[in-house]
């Protein structure tokens, strides 16, 4: 086990720098963010980020209890840049893995445009590592399937979100994530904000996300505080930006 501290222009960048000191790439590493914070400039943008990482060896899930798995990225060495989430027996949600980052333009464009998953080109002025936005429900599902993953259900996204109105608590905090439409309609690089208790980055920050509840109807969640009236999953009309974050079954 090693603990490494690093700074960066965003939390994702700081993590990559910390892992590089151990000759690890993010896709290969098993780690937990023990401490993460960002400093914002007077315009509310991230000016500096710092993290303290705990780097651990991968191990089968059965060798760690739920407390040890909490927030641990790629715990078994077979789910790069994903965290294990415990599910919720009360709502019938089984344990599952979720991407710590929303699908970026770089990841989206890496897929071939062969009908099974979209390809394309990067729009002008867009950060390659910003969350991909603009896919419809069918393309989002196809992309997930091509990656060997799927879109989360509303109940799974709620497990990842946690019990509060926002993933970090009930009160707004721009250093944890910013809700609502982004300034100038431009999303920054993913991983700008520190991960929540479950190890997931940017959850609750700007982005609506596609959910798939198995009825063939595409809905979106997560573009603002979680409502109390059961209307978390909403039609996509008039909601922007809409991206996607993928999950896999843990069994």
Image (tube, helix red, strand yellow):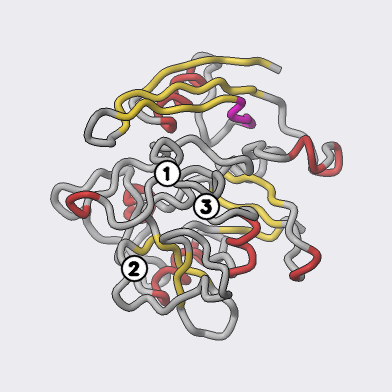
Rendered position, 209 above or below 69? below
How far apart marks 1 and 2 lie (CA) works out to 23 Å
Residue 154 occupies quadrant: bottom right
Where are the magenta residues, as a range?
30-34
Residue 96 occupies quadrant: bottom right
Check whether the beta carbons of the residues at disc 1 and disc 2 lie within 8 A of each other: no
The disc label shown at residue 68, or none: none
Q: Position of residue 220 (x, y in %)?
A: 45, 70
Residue receiving disc 1:
177
Dot placed on the residue nearer the N-terminal end, 3 or 2: 2
Residue receiving disc 3:
166
Magenta stretch: helix, strand or loop mostly = strand
Nearest the eye: 209 or 63? 209
Is 37 within the magenta?
A: no
How far apart marks 3 and 2 lie (CA) works out to 25 Å
Q: Position of residue 223 (x, y in %)?
A: 41, 61
């Amino acid at each position: 086990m090693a603990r490494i501290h690093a700074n960066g222009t965003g939390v994702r960048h700081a993590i990559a720098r910390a892992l590089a000191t151990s000759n690890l790439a993010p896709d290969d590493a098993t780690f937990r963010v023990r401490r993460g914070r960002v400093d914002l400039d007077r315009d509310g943008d991230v000016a500096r980020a710092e993290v303290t990482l705990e780097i651990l060896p991968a191990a089968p899930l059965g060798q760690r209890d739920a407390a040890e798995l909490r927030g641990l990225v790629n715990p078994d060495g077979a789910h790069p840049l994903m965290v294990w989430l415990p599910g919720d027996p009360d709502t019938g949600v089984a344990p599952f893995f979720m991407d710590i980052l929303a699908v970026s333009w770089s990841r989206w464009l890496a897929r071939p445009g062969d009908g099974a998953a979209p390809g394309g080109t990067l729009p002008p002025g867009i950060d390659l590592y910003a969350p991909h936005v603009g896919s419809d429900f069918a393309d989002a599902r196809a992309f997930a399937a091509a990656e060997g993953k799927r879109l989360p259900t509303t109940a799974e996204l709620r497990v990842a979100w946690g019990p509060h109105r926002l993933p970090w608590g009930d009160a707004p905090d721009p250093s944890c994530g910013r809700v609502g439409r982004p300034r100038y309609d431009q999303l920054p690089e993913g991983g700008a904000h520190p991960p929540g208790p479950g190890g997931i980055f940017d959850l609750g920050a700007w982005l609506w996300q596609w959910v798939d509840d198995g009825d063939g109807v595409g809905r979106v969640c997560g573009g603002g505080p979680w409502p109390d009236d059961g209307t978390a999953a909403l039609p996509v009309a008039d909601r922007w930006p809409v991206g996607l974050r993928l999950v896999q079954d843990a069994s």
